[in-house]
Image (tube, rainbow, N blue to C red):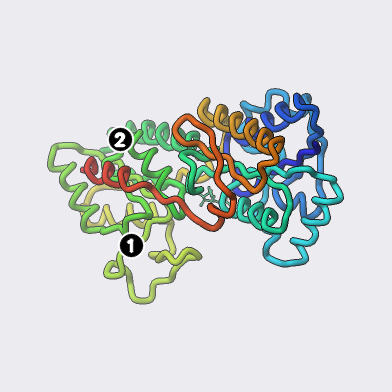
């Protein structure tokens, strides 16, 4: 069997473990493996590299993706989809394993619809791909946030400040929610719940009235503010969220908190630090399990499927079922956050 593999969308720690598992598992079954560089761009432009045991040696501990990635989406035009189809055939692929988030997997779903043999593997630090408990990269991103909060607590305690920590996560509060809980943040704000600045101020005031001189607020980058709190001429960003004072969400919050409470406040964006560096053991194991399972599916002619984790078990769902959908933070975690928050 000739197996193709690509990684698309934002990079995430654990991708290399998945690539390694695809290659080792395929080679041990007597397959040939070809990697496409930079996600769907590699298929569109036919940028390929043969993958062997030497190429994947020790890459499981390395962050990012050694195949490179891009946000190229060939579905933007029929010409680019045709280029993808042609290169799929020219390379004589028996299966293409696409590792990525919603955008990447939607292209895989479209290829499946057009009759090409594909298998999907969910990866995104946002953890918002539906039908799976965990996506590659999420656990590492959560751990990075937790470690950052632990560090930021000592400086905010020393200076008696509020620290606003802005986490990545445009459409879902998984990273902010889990990282904030693990880091014991006083207030956690997620995109699933519209932010009420008065409520944030009240919660922090309670913290202060209990005699604490510092506080930690975690806010996902995708939070939105209520209409009443928004100036009339406010702009909205690409996701329809209001851009307040053209500032990052964390900065804006910090400003509001300081002016409402007279409590010195600083803000920090975790940004790409979420995604940089070595994966956690969880992400290495998850990537390894997903990669191996994807090859197994191909050998069972089980195409058009995405590998998913349910509890400890690996299973599959049709790519068509998840394409274009977002898994937002589950209500039980929102409830937990709200019950603990100040
Ligand atoms: O989708 C993953 C993610 O890290 C989001 O949380 C974030 O908004 C976005 O990617 C950042 O994208 P880029 O790396 O292209 O700046």
Q: Characterize the local packing of mark 1: few (<14), some (14-19) or many (20 or more) Cα atoms within 10 angstroms.
A: some
Question: Closest to the observer: 183 or 254?
Answer: 183
Name the residue: 66% across, 52% down: 108
Q: What element carries label 1?
A: loop
Question: Closest to the observer: 259 or 59?
Answer: 59
Q: Can residue 161 be seen in this view?
A: no
Whole-percent x, y for residue 281 in the image: 52, 25
Whole-percent x, y for residue 301 in the image: 70, 41
Give the mark, 2 or 1, whose residue is nearer the N terminus: 2
Side of 80 where 269 appears, left or right: left
Name the residue: 67% across, 28% down: 59
In which quadrant will I find the N terminus?
Answer: top right
Where 235 falls versus 66 (above or below)? below
Quadrant housing residue 184: top left
Name the residue: 38% across, 39% down: 178
Q: Is residue 187 visible?
A: yes
In which quadrant will I find the C terminus?
Answer: top left
Q: Characterize the local packing of mark 2: few (<14), some (14-19) or many (20 or more) Cα atoms within 10 angstroms.
A: some
Mark 2 residue CB less than 8 A from any atom of ligand 1: no
Location of mark 2 (residue)? 184
Count numbered badges in the picture.
2
Mark 1 residue CB less than 8 A from any atom of ligand 1: no
Side of 150 where 126 appears, left or right: right
Whole-percent x, y for residue 69 in the image: 68, 46
Name the residue: 68% across, 62% down: 75
Q: What element carries label 2?
A: loop
Where 196 falls versus 167 (above or below)? below
Toward the bottom, the furthest residue is 233
Where 71 falls versus 283 (above or below)? below
The label shown at residue 225 is 1
Mark 2 vs mark 1, CA separation in Å? 23 Å
């Amino acid at each position: 069997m000739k197996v193709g593999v690509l990684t698309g969308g934002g990079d995430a720690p654990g991708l290399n473990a998945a690539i390694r598992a695809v290659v080792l598992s395929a080679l041990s079954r007597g397959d040939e493996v070809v990697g496409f560089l930079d996600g769907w761009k590699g298929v569109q432009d036919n940028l390929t590299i043969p993958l062997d045991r030497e190429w994947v040696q020790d890459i499981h501990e390395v962050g990012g993706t050694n195949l490179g990635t891009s946000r190229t989406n060939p579905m933007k035009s029929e010409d680019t989809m045709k280029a993808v189809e042609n290169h799929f055939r020219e390379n004589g692929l028996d299966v293409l394993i696409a590792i990525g988030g919603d955008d990447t997997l939607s292209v895989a779903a479209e290829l499946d619809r057009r009759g090409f043999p594909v298998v999907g593997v969910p990866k995104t630090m946002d953890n918002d791909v539906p039908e799976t408990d965990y996506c590659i990269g999420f656990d590492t991103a959560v751990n990075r946030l937790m470690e950052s909060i632990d560090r930021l607590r000592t400086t905010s305690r020393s200076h008696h400040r509020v620290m606003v920590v802005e986490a990545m996560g445009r459409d879902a509060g998984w990273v902010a929610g889990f990282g904030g809980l693990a880091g014991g943040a006083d207030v956690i704000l997620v995109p699933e719940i519209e932010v009420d600045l008065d409520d944030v101020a009240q919660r922090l005031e309670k913290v202060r009235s209990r005699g604490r001189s510092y506080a930690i607020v975690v806010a996902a980058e995708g939070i939105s503010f209520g209409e009443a709190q928004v100036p009339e001429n406010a702009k909205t960003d690409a996701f329809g969220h209001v851009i307040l004072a053209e500032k990052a969400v964390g900065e804006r919050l910090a400003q509001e908190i300081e002016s409402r409470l007279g409590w010195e406040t600083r803000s920090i964006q975790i940004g790409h630090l979420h995604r940089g560096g070595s994966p956690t053991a969880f992400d290495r194991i998850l990537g390894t399990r997903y990669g191996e399972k994807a090859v197994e599916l191909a050998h069972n002619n089980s195409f058009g499927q995405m590998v998913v984790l349910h509890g400890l078990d690996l299973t599959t769902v049709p790519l068509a079922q998840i394409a274009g959908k977002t898994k937002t933070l589950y209500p039980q975690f929102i409830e937990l956050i709200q019950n603990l928050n100040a």
